Amino acid sequence: MLEGLVSPENLSLSYADMSVPERLKWLQQHQQQEVLSLSSNDSPDLLQILQFHGSNNDELLQSTFSHFQMVGSGFGTNYNMGFGHSHEAMDGCISRTSSCQIHPPDTMGVMLKNSEENRAISLKNKRKSEVKTREEEKTEKKIKVEAETESNISNKEASSDTSKETSKGASQIQKLDYIHVRARRGEATDRHSLAERARREKISKKMKYLQDLVPGCNTVTGKAGVLDEIINYVQSLQRQVEFLSMKLAVINPELELGVEDLSVKQFQAAYFTNFPVVIASKPSVMVDVPLFPLDQQGSLNLSVSNPNQTSIDAPSESWETQSQSLFASVLR
Amino acid sequence: MERQIINKKKRVFSVEPNKIPPSEVFTRKYTSLLVPALKKLNMNKNSSQVNQLTVKHEVDMALALSAQEFAWSRFLLQKLSSSNNPTTTTSSSSNGIRIQERSGKEGGHEDGEREEKLRELQKLLPGGEEMNVEEMLGEIGNYIKCLELQTIALKSIVQDTT
């Protein structure tokens, strides 16, 4: 009916030009775009539903519904549960930490009715799309709905990809929700993909921890670079140990027992000042002990090795009681 | 009293989520193991016979014994005790379980790189090749920590004697 009104105006691709279903589709496309530009995450099915029926377009709804049905039958009740979750997601919509209970699969009709809640749902769509896209990439399984939505969301994937990282933090926090959400995708081997996702997130968490541990890893981005740094660091540490043990082998005969206690103090210092620390001067380390002249310490060391009581007693007064006891116990 | 100070400081510094040895405990154990072992070496053999390998053996043994709560230390102990030839911590045994990483997010070749690196990392860690990836990544963390502490300990020992 509108076409009759519009045709004389002859506007190119104006809103009025389109027929009703076309217009609705156009609206939907725009809705999808704006929806995907928002950031949130939840069940991916919701996204599909919105893409198809952002407005009350029954025709598209029906087509979607049929597709979902096909998928649902193919993948069992999980899919319906997914819808149940989505429904609840819509209800508890804005909070990201919406709990993920599994609802009985009654929900198709309810979902379709709630299409007017786009605005509320849209908050979650970005995450959904990300989950969706991630899963799409990850799993080779072609869900029929995905095939349908591919054309619609292909242009959205770019935008969603960029926000993957930002939502990753959120997704990790709500890992539990995520797992449930993924189960609801209704993939045939959902257990596997679920476990794999959990595993991947564990691994990335550990990688992050390692990144903090290894100095200089913060600047490198990407797992390969971080792994590289870690490998180099471990290798250098092992080389250092080898080198030091070589040195130790050379000087071994002069080894004495006072070392043990000295080392402890130096470790404290080392940890005050962060690894790697070249342990420069021992006297500076011992906070509680008055400064030792180095040569005196040298003589002290040598004197310890031969059980000469008198030479030790004098400097030992300056040591903490701990070291005194140690020396005493050793010499006896 | 001094111990309290030490313990307080230990509390300040050990905040890692994974199992990280309180540096205090590890270093005490380490030095208390290593130094007597080295002395024993000195006593049992003539100084001329103390070569680098045996020292390395003792070093590794001390490391393994000081960190027994970790998986890699058990592997290291096994290596050390099973073979009379002291194995260095840098020895790489190439047989092992391949890392199974399914191609995922980043695309095929990037994942291959990552696998390669993970495999290398596995080689560095004693017993790393018998672990799966997550376990290994966790163990690498405390292995690095223990290596650092060991380095400090060795440095201080060497420095004390020179």
Image (spheres, rainbow, N blue to C red):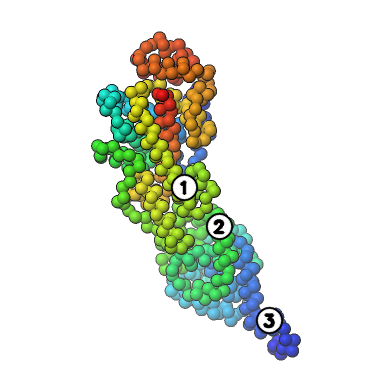
Badge 2 density bin: few <14, some 14–19, many ≥20, Cα 10 Å: few
The mark nearer the N terminus, 2 or 1, is 2
What residue is disc 1 on?
A229
Callout 3: chain: A
- Estimate the x, y position of residue A80 in percent, counting from the top left: 49, 70
What residue is disc 3 on?
A13
Badge 1 density bin: few <14, some 14–19, many ≥20, Cα 10 Å: many
Q: Which residue is drawn at the image coordinates 42% and 56% (left, top)?
A: B113
Callout 2: chain: A
Left or right of residue A221, residue B128 in this image: left
Badge 3 density bin: few <14, some 14–19, many ≥20, Cα 10 Å: few
Q: Are marks 2 and 1 in contact (CB under 8 Å)?
A: no
Between marks 2 and 1 in the image, the one whose residue lies nearer the viewer: 1
Callout 1: chain: A
Between marks 1 and 3 in the image, the one whose residue lies nearer the viewer: 1
Relative to A6, say whether A188 is above or below: above
Q: Amino acid at mark 3?
A: Leu
State the separation of the CA atoms marked 3 and 2. 36 Å
What residue is disc 2 on?
A165
Disc 1 on helix, strand or loop? Answer: helix
The mark nearer the N terminus, 1 or 3, is 3
Q: Amino acid at mark 2?
A: Glu
**Residue A68 visible at all:** no
**Residue A66 visible at all:** yes
Q: Are marks 3 and 2 in contact (CB under 8 Å)?
A: no
State the separation of the CA atoms marked 1 and 3. 55 Å
Mark 2 and mark 1 on one chain: yes
